[in-house]
Image (cartoon, grey):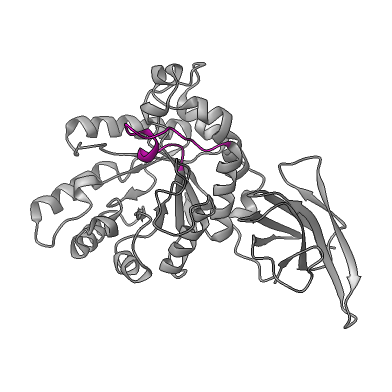
């Protein structure tokens, strides 16, 4: 779980952000717009071949000031200081200097370590040494590292050991042809959940897992590639499937890619067209201002809820993935259809609840909960609803 200023949060962030003095096309402050929707973090630090020189230090101060002003937090990438071999005193001292410059700034959120270290075969002693220095110099801010959608459980676990506090993976399934970012046999959008599950297995419950999801990426913006960006429905599915699988934070990558911007967006340096049409509504559902936030920071429920297809009551439905959380007298059931055609689904294993369940973010739609007695005389409470391909529903039920 991520804790910010002693408060549990389900964070949403952005890589890379608008310029430090950025504005939306209608003139609103960029970071106030992101924060108002529920965004909390944005990645900073050197880009491309840049390093922590004086120009990037000055830019980092601008970003942190902008973050603090909007109530957001930076995720500075430590870049060339993310891997330091033991005994390299020059780089060790430079890392300490950078940490000390920013560790007390109210705009600092989390340090970002080496990018995709397992895929890049980064030195494990170097990663561990850098992590040690960061934690000794600044024990108050965690270290986040993102892996590529590569590697095995064994190799990824080796790289997770004493190198980070928050782990995760970047996975971008929307492309032509689909699924080229992953080596898994599944090339559908549901491969997001497959990679989320891999990282959950890697973490073994020892640290939070964040998923970095797609706005745009190199596989759709490079010369010779066909530009393809996720729709609202696709973005919503990827976000919820990540959460259902176990993610405790989401980062959205690629709003800064010029090749994916409209002419108007290029003038202001960020993909506000995609934000307005696609991403903002998803962030509003899941961000820190959402009425779903209490469920997103709650532990998993111990209720044994299962899904079946109407007419096939005794066989589990493999196409449905679900997550149950409890907050006081309320039960939240998050479910998505990872595969299959439209079908009517029943959720079994609920306690006594009101007969009408709210379907959040789909008002005025509701779902019906029925009560029946099984062949052993035990009362059963069952929620029934329809799911289309890659559809997501969020149910809020009230305990009796």
Tell me: 385 left or right of 150. right
Q: Which of 87 and 97 is in front in this view?
A: 87
Q: Which of 364 and 112 is in front in this view?
A: 364
Q: Residue at x 42, y 28 (%)?
A: 260
Q: Which residue is drawn at 32% across and 29% down?
A: 62
Q: Check the image and report above or below for 374 versus 52.
A: below
Examine the residues drawn in magenta and state their main secondary structure: loop
Tell me: 12 left or right of 377. left
Q: Which residue is drawn at 37% across and 48% down?
A: 110
User: Is residue 143 among the parts visible in the rendering?
Assistant: yes
Is residue 156 highlighted in magenta? no
The picture places residue 327, in percent across and down from the top left corner, at 69, 59
User: Is residue 248 among the parts visible in the rendering?
Assistant: no
Q: Which of 308 and 366 is in front in this view?
A: 308
Q: Indicate the quadrant where residue 132 lies.
A: bottom left
What is the quadrant of the C terminus in the image? bottom right
> Which residue ends up furthest to the bottom in the rendered image?
376
Is residue 228 highlighted in magenta? yes
Residue stretch in magenta? 214-231
The picture places residue 221, in percent across and down from the top left corner, at 37, 33
Tell me: 334 left or right of 270. right
Q: Check the image and report above or below for 203 versus 244.
A: below
């Amino acid at each position: 779980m991520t804790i910010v200023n002693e408060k549990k949060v389900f964070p949403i962030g952005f890589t890379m952000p608008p310029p430090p003095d950025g504005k939306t096309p209608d003139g609103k402050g960029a970071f106030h717009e992101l924060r108002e929707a529920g965004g909390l973090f944005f990645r900073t630090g050197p880009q491309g071949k840049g390093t922590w020189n004086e120009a990037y230090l000055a830019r980092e101060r601008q970003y942190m000031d902008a973050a603090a002003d909007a109530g957001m937090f930076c995720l500075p990438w430590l870049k060339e200081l993310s891997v330091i071999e033991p005994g390299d005193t020059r780089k060790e001292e430079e890392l300490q200097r950078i940490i000390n410059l920013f560790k007390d700034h109210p705009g600092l959120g989390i340090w970002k370590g080496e990018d995709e270290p397992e895929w890049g075969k980064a030195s494990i002693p170097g990663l561990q040494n850098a992590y040690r220095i960061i934690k000794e110099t600044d024990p108050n801010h965690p270290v986040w590292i993102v892996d590529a959608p590569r590697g095995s459980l064994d190799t990824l676990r080796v790289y997770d050991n004493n190198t980070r506090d928050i782990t995760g993976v970047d996975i971008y399934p929307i492309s032509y042809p689909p699924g080229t970012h992953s080596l898994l046999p599944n090339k559908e959008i549901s491969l997001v959940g497959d990679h989320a599950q891999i990282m959950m297995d890697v973490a073994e419950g020892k640290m939070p897992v964040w998923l970095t999801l797609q706005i745009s990426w190199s596989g759709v913006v490079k010369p010779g590639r066909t530009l393809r960006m996720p729709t609202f429905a696709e973005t919503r599915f990827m976000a919820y499937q990540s959460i259902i699988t176990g993610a405790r934070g989401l980062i959205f990558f690629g709003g800064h890619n010029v090749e994916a911007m409209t002419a108007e967006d290029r003038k202001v340096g960020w993909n506000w067209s995609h934000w307005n049409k696609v991403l903002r509504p998803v962030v509003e559902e899941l961000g820190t201002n959402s009425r779903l936030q209490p469920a997103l920071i709650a532990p998993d429920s111990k209720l044994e809820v299962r899904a079946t297809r109407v007419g096939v009551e005794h066989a589990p439905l493999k196409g449905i993935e679900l997550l149950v959380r409890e907050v006081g007298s309320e039960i939240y059931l998050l479910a998505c259809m990872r595969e299959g055609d439209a079908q009517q689904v029943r959720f079994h294993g609920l306690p006594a609840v009101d007969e009408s369940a709210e379907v959040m973010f789909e008002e005025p739609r509701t779902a019906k909960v029925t009560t029946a007695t099984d062949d052993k005389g035990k009362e059963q409470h069952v929620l029934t609803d329809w799911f289309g391909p890659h559809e997501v529903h969020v149910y809020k039920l009230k305990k009796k």
